[in-house]
Amino acid sequence: MIRRRHHPLATESTRRLEAFTDGVFAIAATLLVLDLTSHALGEVGSDSAMWSALGGMWPLFLNFVLSFGLLCLLWMIHVEQFEHIARVDAVVLWLNNARLLFIVLVPFATGLMTEYSDWLAGRLAMPVVFFFAIFTSWLQYLWVLRHRDVMLPDLSDEEARLSGRSSLSALVIAALVVVAAPFIGSFAFLLFFLDAPFTRLLRGRTRVGPA
Amino acid sequence: MIRRRHHPLATESTRRLEAFTDGVFAIAATLLVLDLTSHALGEVGSDSAMWSALGGMWPLFLNFVLSFGLLCLLWMIHVEQFEHIARVDAVVLWLNNARLLFIVLVPFATGLMTEYSDWLAGRLAMPVVFFFAIFTSWLQYLWVLRHRDVMLPDLSDEEARLSGRSSLSALVIAALVVVAAPFIGSFAFLLFFLDAPFTRLLRGRTRVGPA
Amino acid sequence: MIRRRHHPLATESTRRLEAFTDGVFAIAATLLVLDLTSHALGEVGSDSAMWSALGGMWPLFLNFVLSFGLLCLLWMIHVEQFEHIARVDAVVLWLNNARLLFIVLVPFATGLMTEYSDWLAGRLAMPVVFFFAIFTSWLQYLWVLRHRDVMLPDLSDEEARLSGRSSLSALVIAALVVVAAPFIGSFAFLLFFLDAPFTRLLRGRTRVGPA
Amino acid sequence: MIRRRHHPLATESTRRLEAFTDGVFAIAATLLVLDLTSHALGEVGSDSAMWSALGGMWPLFLNFVLSFGLLCLLWMIHVEQFEHIARVDAVVLWLNNARLLFIVLVPFATGLMTEYSDWLAGRLAMPVVFFFAIFTSWLQYLWVLRHRDVMLPDLSDEEARLSGRSSLSALVIAALVVVAAPFIGSFAFLLFFLDAPFTRLLRGRTRVGPA
C-alpha cells in the first residue's frame, strides 16, 4: 500500500488487472484437482487393493504437484513485476491477456502430459505452454521498461537494467526446458526451479521480501 | 487509487461490483479450457498420429482463442468504464448483473459455435451473446452518464460526449457482427477487433493508459 | 472507501470476508452455465431441427436466468449489509460461512429444479435453499445490530430500526415463497423480486446508491 | 485498513497473496457442490421415491457440510494470521503455495471419503490433507514469528508467545484427528471444532473481532 503512495498516478486499471490475474491463476490452479477427482479408482475389495489403486495414481499426483508449482512460480513472477508498476496502458493489458491465455491452457497441457507422455507432443505440451507464458511476460515487461518514466517511476536505471536481465534469464531457462523435455521428459522442469536463485544471483539482491 | 481521492463519495459497492465482475470474467475465461480438456483424443499409436489428433483440434483451439479474446475485450471495456465511476445505484448494479449473465453464457455459446457451426444457430450463438453483453454495457453507461454529476463527478461535458459516442460505436459494431455472421461465420468477429482503434479515433485520445 | 475512513477501527478481516464472499458468489453464478453446456443437443440434421432443439432447452434457460438473478439478489443484499459494517467477530464470520454454504448449494438446487420439477422435492429445492440463505443473513445482521456500537458505528438508532425491519421483510418473503412453491412452482420466486421495492417502502429511502 | 497504517512498509505482495488465497479457498469450497450435482438420482416415479432418493444422499450432504466447514476453518486461520502480517518474503510465499496445494486437494479427499469410507485410505484421506494444510500453515507462521521485527512489527513479545502457542495447538489437534480417524471415522473431525475455543483458552483473549 505504502508503495502506491509513491506513485500518485497509479490507475484503477492496475488494481483490476491484478484482480483479474489473481482470479485466473487461482481458478487454473484449483481446476487441476479435477484431473484427480475424475480418475476412477474402480471397484476396490480390500485395504491393500485401495492403497495400490491410490499408488497407481502417482503420475497424476506428480503432474498435479508439478503444474501447481509452475503456476505458483508464474504467479510470483507476475506479483514481483507488478509490485512496482504504477500505471498500465492498452498494450500492457493485451499482453497480460495473452499471458493469461497460456495460464488457462495449463490444465489442458497437464492432461496431455499425464495421458500421452509416451509421445513427443505429450512431453512437449507443458514446456511449450510455459515457454509462451514466460515469453509474453517478458514482452510485457520489456514494454513496461521502455515506458518506465511513467509506468515504473520509482525504479532507478540500475534497477531497471538488473530486472530486465533477470527477466531475460527466465526466458532462456524456459527455452532450455523446451529443448530438454523430449529427452528427459518432466525432469526438464527442474531447470525452472533454478530460476529464482539464478535471478537473485544475476540481480545481486532479492526483490520480493523485507528488502 | 489516486483517482478515487478525487471522488470523496466513492462507495464500497463500486469496489465490490468490480470484485464480483472480475471474478465472473476470470471464471468464464478459465472455464473455456474445459472444452479442450473434455475433448477425447482417443487411442494414439504413434507420434505422427498424436500430432494429427492434436491438429484435428484446430477449430477448438481457434474458438478457444476467439472466445478468450472477446471476453478480455469485454472485460477491458468494463475496466475503462468504471475507471471514472465514483458511485453506483441499484439500477447500475442490476444492469451489471444482466451484463454478467451474458458473460457467463460465453462458454455455452463457444460450445455451440464449435459443435454446430454448420447451422445458423451455431454461427449466431456467440455474436448474439456478445451483442447483448455490449447492449447491456451500453444501457448501463447511458444511465451512468445521465447521472454523471453524482456518478462521474470528474468527467467534463466534452469527455462525456466523447465516451458516450465511443460506447455507441461498440454497440453498432456488435450489431454488424450479428448481421455478418450467418454469411462469413466467425470471421465476422474481426469487426470486433476494430472496436479499440475505432473508439480511439472517434474520441480523439486514449482513455486507459498513461494519458 | 471514504466510508471506511469513518470507521478508524475497520479490520482486515472485513475486507477478506468480502473478497471470499464475492469469490464464492462469482463461482456459484458461473457454474450455473455447466447445466447448459452439459446438455447434449444430439444429432441435428437441419437448421429447423437445430432451432427446435435449442427451443426445447427453454426450461433450462429459464432456470438459469432465475438462479442467476436470485444469486445476484442475495449478493446485493450482502453488499448492502456490509456497506456500513466496520468490524466483524468470529460469530459474524461463521454466520457468513453458513450463508455461503447455501450459496454453494444453488447450482445443485437448480439441477433438481430442472430435472425433477414434477415432484415436490424438485419444486421445493430452490425455495428452501434460498430461505436458509436469507435466514442466515438475517441472523448475521441481527448479531451485527446487537453490537452496532462497535460494528456499525455510523448507524443512527433510527437507521438501525429501519434496516432491521427491512431485513425481516426479506425473511418473511422467503418463507412465503417456500409455502407457495408447491402450488405455483417457480412462479413463487416472483415474490422475491418484490423484496427490493418492499424493503425500500419499509425503510422510506434507498441505501445503495447516490443517497 | 487502519492496521495497515501501522505498517508503513506493507508490500503489495501481502495484498496479492491474500487475493490469490481467497480465490483458491472460494473455488475449492464451491467445487464441493460438483460432488452433489454429479450424483445421479436416477428415474423417480413418485414423491416418496424422490424423498428417499434425496435421503439416500445423506452421506454426501454430511461430507459436503464437513468439508465446507473445515475449509472455512482453515480460511479463518489464514485471515487471523495475516491480520497482522505487514510484509512477506519468498519463503512465506512458497509456504503459502504449499498450504494452498492441500486446500486444492480437499475436493479430491472429500470424494475419497464419500466413496471409499469402508477402507482405511478413504477414512484417512481428509484427516491427512488437513494435517498437512495445518502443518504448512504452522511452518509459515513459525517463519513469520522468527522475522517478526519486520513482518509483524506491531506484535508484542507476549502476543507472539501466545499466538505461537495457539498455532501449535491447531497442529496437535490435527495430528490427533489423523490418529483417531481410522477408529471413529469422520467423527474425529469433531476435534477440529474444539480448535477455536481451545486456542482462545490458550491465548486468554480473542484475536479476530471487536477486541
Image: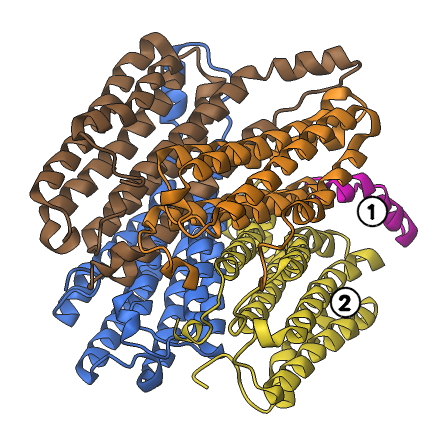
Chain colours: A blue, B yellow, C orange, D brown
Question: In the rendered image, is residue B41 in sight?
Answer: no
**Camera-side residue of A64 and D84:** D84
Characterize the local packing of mark 2: few (<14), some (14-19) or many (20 or more) Cα atoms within 10 angstroms: some
Instruction: Answer with the quarter of the image where residue D7 lies.
Output: bottom left
The tag on residue B185 is 2
**Camera-side residue of C162 and C27:** C162
Question: In the rendered image, is residue A2 in sight?
Answer: yes
The tag on residue B179 is none
Q: Is residue C53 magenta?
A: yes
Left or right, residue A113 beside residue B74: left
Kindly identify which residue carries mark 1. C54
Residue in the image at 47% along x and 60% along y: A20
| Residue C47 in the image, given as x and y percentages of width and height | 89, 54
Question: Could you tell me the amino acid type at mark 2?
Answer: Gly
- In the depicted structure, whether residue C193 falls above or below residue B19: above
- Say which chain tag 2 marks: B
Question: Could you tell me the amino acid type at mark 1?
Answer: Leu
**Camera-side residue of D13 and A118:** D13
Left or right, residue D51 beside residue D126: right
Provide the residue span drawn in magenta.
Answer: C38-64
Residue in the image at 38% along x and 29% along y: D70
Residue in the image at 85% along x and 41% along y: C56
